[in-house]
């Protein structure tokens, strides 16, 4: 009996086993490239370019940095990589993730653990850090909902909570071509790795 192929060839030449990922098969260039081409909101955003998961990740890390400026650089890196598994499994809106259930969560957790280990983070982040990243993620989602995904202020508040003008002041969502976002993600990753 032959086993079904569960790996994907990356542009780096690595073969990433999606069911049993290992840190040695993970490269930041593959992550940055994949995330720059994965559209958030299933592509249902205003603008001439898709709003990518890479762009979202950069925004979440910026919000995290504003909220906890003295945080260890490792946790800034964790914020940047919070959606990194989506470079191979894609992005799904939260209601669909919930409908898919624990299988999606398990796949995401295995990939996240391998990514974390690859870049010197603990496989499982401390709960306090996960909560802080989640807060930045929710603020980002609310900003995205209103600025580019067509939500009214009231609707965004109902789904994502009240706005946090102190943290989001001066942060506007700008849609860029994938190559520019890929370069920005890779550059920020390198800056954070150098500080870790």
Image: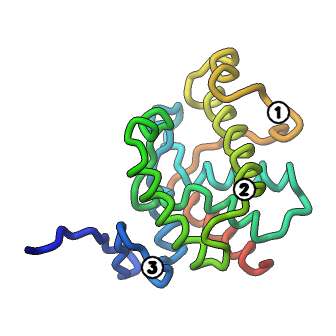
Q: Residues within 10 Å of mark 3 (few under 14, many from 20)?
A: some
Please give the residue where the numbered disc 2 appears in the rendered image: 127
Q: Nearer the viewer, residue 182 or 130?
A: 130
Residues under labels 2 and 1: Cα distance? Answer: 22 Å
Please give the residue where the numbered disc 3 appears in the rendered image: 22
Q: Nearer the viewer, residue 170 or 15?
A: 15
In the rendered image, residue 28, in percent from the top left (x then y), is placed at 54, 74
Residue 183 is drawn in which quadrant? Answer: bottom right
Q: Residues within 10 Å of mark 1 (few under 14, many from 20)?
A: few
In the rendered image, residue 98, in percent from the top left (x then y), is placed at 46, 37
In the rendered image, residue 130, in percent from the top left (x then y), is placed at 70, 54
Query: Which numbered dot is residue 164?
Result: 1
* Quadrant (top left/top right/bottom left/bottom right) for the N terminus: bottom left
Q: Residues within 10 Å of mark 2 (few under 14, many from 20)?
A: few
Residues under labels 1 and 3: Cα distance? Answer: 38 Å
* Mark closest to the chain's N terminus, 1 or 3: 3
* Mark closest to the chain's N terminus, 3 or 2: 3
Measuring 61% from the left and 57% from the top, which residue is drawn there? 82
* Mark closest to the chain's N terminus, 2 or 1: 2
In the rendered image, residue 6, in percent from the top left (x then y), is placed at 27, 68
- Nearest to viewer (mark 1 / mark 3): 3
Labelled pair 2, 1 in contact (Cβ < 8 Å): no
Secondary structure at numbered mark 2: helix
Measuring 77% from the left and 78% from the top, which residue is drawn there? 196
Residue 165 is drawn in which quadrant? Answer: top right
Q: Nearer the viewer, residue 176 or 56?
A: 56
């Amino acid at each position: 009996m032959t086993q079904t192929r569960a790996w994907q060839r990356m542009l780096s030449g690595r073969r990433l086993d999606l069911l049993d990922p290992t840190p040695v098969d993970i490269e930041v260039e593959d992550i940055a490239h994949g995330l720059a081409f994965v559209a958030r909101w299933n592509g249902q955003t205003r603008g001439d370019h898709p709003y990518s998961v890479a762009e979202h990740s950069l925004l979440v890390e910026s919000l995290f940095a504003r909220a906890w400026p003295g945080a260890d650089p490792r946790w800034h890196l964790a914020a940047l990589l919070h959606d990194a598994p989506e470079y191979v499994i894609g992005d799904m809106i939260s209601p669909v993730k919930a409908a898919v259930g624990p299988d999606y969560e398990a796949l995401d957790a295995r990939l996240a653990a391998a990514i974390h280990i690859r870049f010197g983070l603990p496989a499982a982040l401390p709960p306090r850090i996960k909560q802080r990243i989640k807060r930045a993620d929710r603020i980002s989602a609310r900003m995205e909902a209103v600025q580019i995904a067509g939500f009214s202020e009231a609707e965004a508040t109902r789904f994502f909570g009240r706005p946090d003008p102190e943290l989001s002041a001066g942060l506007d969502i700008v849609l860029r071509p994938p190559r520019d976002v890929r370069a920005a993600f890779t550059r920020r990753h390198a800056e954070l790795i150098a500080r870790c």
